[in-house]
Amino acid sequence: MAFPILRRVFSSKSSRFLRSFTAFKSSLAQPSHDNDFTNPIMPSFDYTPPPYTGPSADEILQKRRRFLNPAVFHLFTEPLCLVEGKMQYLFDEKGRRYVDAFGGIATVSCGHCHPRVVEAIVDQTKRFQHSTVLYLNSAIAEFAEALASKFPGDLKVVFFTNSGTEATELSLLMARLYSGCEDVISVRNGYHGNALASMAVTAQSSYKFNVLQSGVHHAQNPDQYRGVFGSDGAKYAKDVEDIITYATCGRVAAFIAESIQGVGGIMELAPGYLPAVYDAVRKAGGLCIADEVQTGFARTGNHFWGFQAHGVVPDIVTMAKGIGNGVPLGAVITTREVAKVLAERNYFNTFGGNPVCAAAGLAVLQVIEEENLQQNALVVGSYLKRRLLSLKHKYHLIGDVRGRGLMLGVELVADGDSKTPATTHALRLINQMKEMGVLIGKGGFYGNVLRITPPLCFTKEDADFLVDAMDIALSRRM
């Protein structure tokens, strides 16, 4: 069973062989769930966590079941107990190392416990932490200036929140106040948060994700893989035009969409869709909101913000998660004309953009620029996508490989012609890859899309390890 892996190693370039051999020696100390040499070799990493002395995974699980709301769930069949993280790697309570190929969407942009970000948080915590609205402090002002410099046009006014959900709620409130209209249009299969308005514009497959709210309309998803119009974005945009004409009587407050649907299965919107929709919405008096919670902060490689790939400039942009590398932080940026509607109503956020979170956010921006992480997302992401496409040619189970930079998706189908979702296979695959030391997520309308969104410090060696593990997991079911 080891021979296929050995053949790949010895037939590759000598430089890759040396890296693999070094990693192999390092991997001998890595615990294995099955002591099986068919597993790929994890890249070497010069760090060993101290022994863990806390409660066991079973004890933690029992406490979760007893004291936490049942809505709190875990990803894998056998829950994974993580106790430490360093850059693109995570460690469980037994000291085993995992490649984190999903944490980039969850919280982390520039790497777990990045020393520059940790130092900024600790330093600010030692000096001062208080409410945002009561006193002057340089941290929030400096971060707002740095963040605004990353946006085009008149997008220069920032309002900080504590989460992406809160950012979505605020963006919808601003649009409704500015337009004097209640109607909002969102895209089916999108995801925007977990509060009343944000869940209403979230149009996921299950009722569990939806809260019905009057004035919210869900437009046809411009899905290039399953959609009836293929990659013709203008034809999908016609549905938004029809909603404005027939359902909202010609007026609308806002249109909100991700440039690449994250929870929806790394679904890139069809080319031409956003320009056509933005034009129709603005003619109807509405504002265009770009949800950059998952696509923002250089993740897509070619651009710093996902909407830039579509050649549009939104009126409002929401962001969170990667903005602070894990601290509770979100933001809404808009124009001065739109922003003034909040000043007229005395809206404030007690802790949004507090000094500690603002210090973390500023450090993240500096790290992304100084370590050239946008270029790394482009180079490593393009390499990883090419390797994933090679698996598509090898396995009929893979129906589509898509995404940009380090935001990639692999859709699994039981039949390539009918595109029958292989939901069970997706769950089995992420569990098998976890056993080999690779953590990925899943999503999509049918839960059959493998989501790959690592920290932006991900390397080509990590990409090779991920694809080799996926290759083995796919071969085991054939």
Image (cartoon, rainbow, N blue to C red):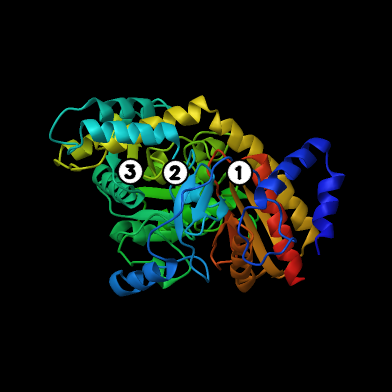
Q: Quadrant of the C terminus?
A: bottom right
Specify which label sits upstream in the sequence, 2 or 1: 2
Observer-nearest residue: 163 or 119? Answer: 119
Give coordinates of residue 200: x percent, y percent.
35, 61
**Residue drawn at 46 percent across, 64 percent down:** 204
- Spatial CA distance of label 3 from label 2 is 13 Å
Secondary structure beneath dot 2 equals loop
Q: Is label 3 or label 1 in front?
A: 3
Query: In this rendering, does residue 361 appear at all?
Result: no
- Spatial CA distance of label 2 from label 1 is 14 Å
- The residue under label 3 is 329
Name the kind of residue labelled 1 in the image: Arg
Q: Can you say whether 209 is above or below 27 in the image?
A: below
Give coordinates of residue 51: x percent, y percent.
46, 53
Q: Are marks 3 and 1 in contact (CB under 8 Å)?
A: no
Query: In this rendering, does residue 119 appear at all?
Result: yes
- The residue under label 2 is 292
- Spatial CA distance of label 3 from label 1 is 24 Å
For disc 2, the neighbor class at 10 Å (few under 14, some 14 to 19, many from 20) is: many
Report the side of 438 relative to 12 (left or right): left
Rendered image: mark on residue 436? none
Observer-nearest residue: 344 or 402? Answer: 402
For disc 3, the neighbor class at 10 Å (few under 14, some 14 to 19, many from 20) is: many
Specify which label sits upstream in the sequence, 3 or 1: 3
Name the kind of residue labelled 2 in the image: Glu
Secondary structure beneath dot 3 equals loop
Report the side of 282 relative to 10 (left or right): left
Name the kind of residue labelled 3 in the image: Leu
